[in-house]
Amino acid sequence: MSSSAAAGGGPELRQTRYCAPLADAVTSQAAGANAVFVRSYEHGENESSLPAGLASTAFVYDNALAVIALVACGNVPSATIIGNALSLAARNDRSFPDGRIRNAYRAGPAGEGAPALPGWWDDKQKIWAEDPAQDGTSTGNVAWAALALLTLHQATKQESFLADAEHLIDWVIANVSSGSGFRGGFHGYDPQQVPLTWISTEHNVDVYAAATWLFRLTGEQKYADAASQARRFLDRAFDADHFLLGTKPDGSLADSGMLALDVQLWPWMAVLDAPARWRSALNFAATHLAVKDGFDFNGDRDGLWVEGTAQASLAYRIAGDPHRSAQLLTTLEAERTPSGLLNATREARVSTGLSIDPTGTGKEADFFYFRRPHLGATAWVTLAALGWNPFTGRKVN
């Protein structure tokens, strides 16, 4: 199979099918502004509206992915509009002067000053309500914002994007380094937030990628040290043929039964000189996380996770299997909605085995993905179709 077929068709088809929906989302929500946070979800086909907790929410992770995918599409102007909002957030916060970026912001045009956080009027309690997880700061999301800004810097040569990416990773180094891996971040409402002491394998992949990129550009030793710390943790998290989620708050490794698809794929996608044995995690995922024509988030196999299946498509392409990569992309086309965005799941709901409360006190596995059009899933499918590695800013050979 040719590489163009594996990528989902020729250039014109890829622009129409994969790139146009992301550009349309930016244009429709920016309303002419030069900075915008794009809403992460649209309501599903059996819904008249989104739940209050998502209606105004633009997750930083989804917006960072959209920036990178739009650059991969060659649409730097649309990517820049979201990038300007991320830069604004990196320089301004309503409560904290330490340089953190939040997990989510209010969707829509971003003006001057600190960007607004998502929220809704709770008529029952007669209060303005916010989500403590959205108000918090996840280390991985900070790194993804940095990767988006580094991708924009590469495309535009605009130095402010590089400076803001440095600012974000400097925050990571100063605030969540344990010396043997980067901790989870902070959770909760302003002005006091709870530090998250567990360490995530996924987050350390993200920090490794951003810090490595920064060291390549700046030559500053602090970034080489940060990348080295993250890499050492990834070595620790690899267990025979797959990666563990990370550590518990007490520093012990996570239970081996807790599986996540992205954790099996991202480390060797991001670390270009990764040991060959790390790629056994792809076969592990195919054995333990696969569902019909795709992949689940975790090992319960209760449904197809679109974002993760797109990640697997890109992973197979990196691993030299364009046929399997193309098969997975074909599967995902069934989840394209009238707007062009893809649903987050094939089934009505897919579980993750994780809790919405990241502090470790929440005992219920209540973090789910639902069958709604999703910006992040659409961006990952676009990256897979175009063969763009978001961790390195390069096309896959």
Image (cartoon, rainbow, N blue to C red):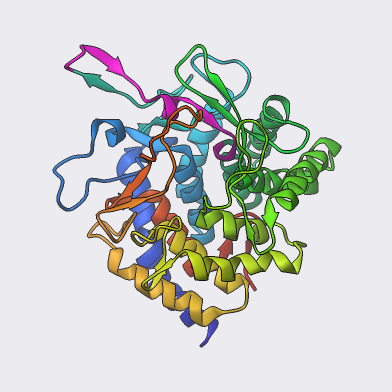
Q: Where is residue 185 in the image (x, y as percent from the top left)?
A: 59, 29
Q: Where is residue 213 in the image (x, y as percent from the top left)?
A: 72, 48
Q: Position of residue 72 (x, y in %)?
A: 53, 60
Residue 131, picture quadrant: top left
Q: Residue at x 41, y 60 (%)?
A: 296
Residue 222, picture quadrant: top right
In this view, 108 is above or below 287:
above
Nearest the eye: 311 or 35: 311
Q: Residue at x 34, y 54 (%)?
A: 344
Nearest the eye: 28 or 104: 104
Q: Which residue is drawn at 46% across and 41% down?
A: 82
| In this picture, residue 311 sits left or right of residue 223 | left
Q: Residue at x 49, y 56 (%)?
A: 69
Q: Position of residue 130 (x, y in %)?
A: 35, 22
Q: Which quadrant does the C terminus fall into?
A: bottom right
Is residue 124 magenta-colored?
yes
Q: What stretch is highlighted in magenta?
A: 123-141
Is residue 307 magenta-colored?
no
In this view, 93 is above or below 22:
above
The residue at the far bottom in this view is 1
| In this picture, residue 65 sits left or right of residue 196 | left
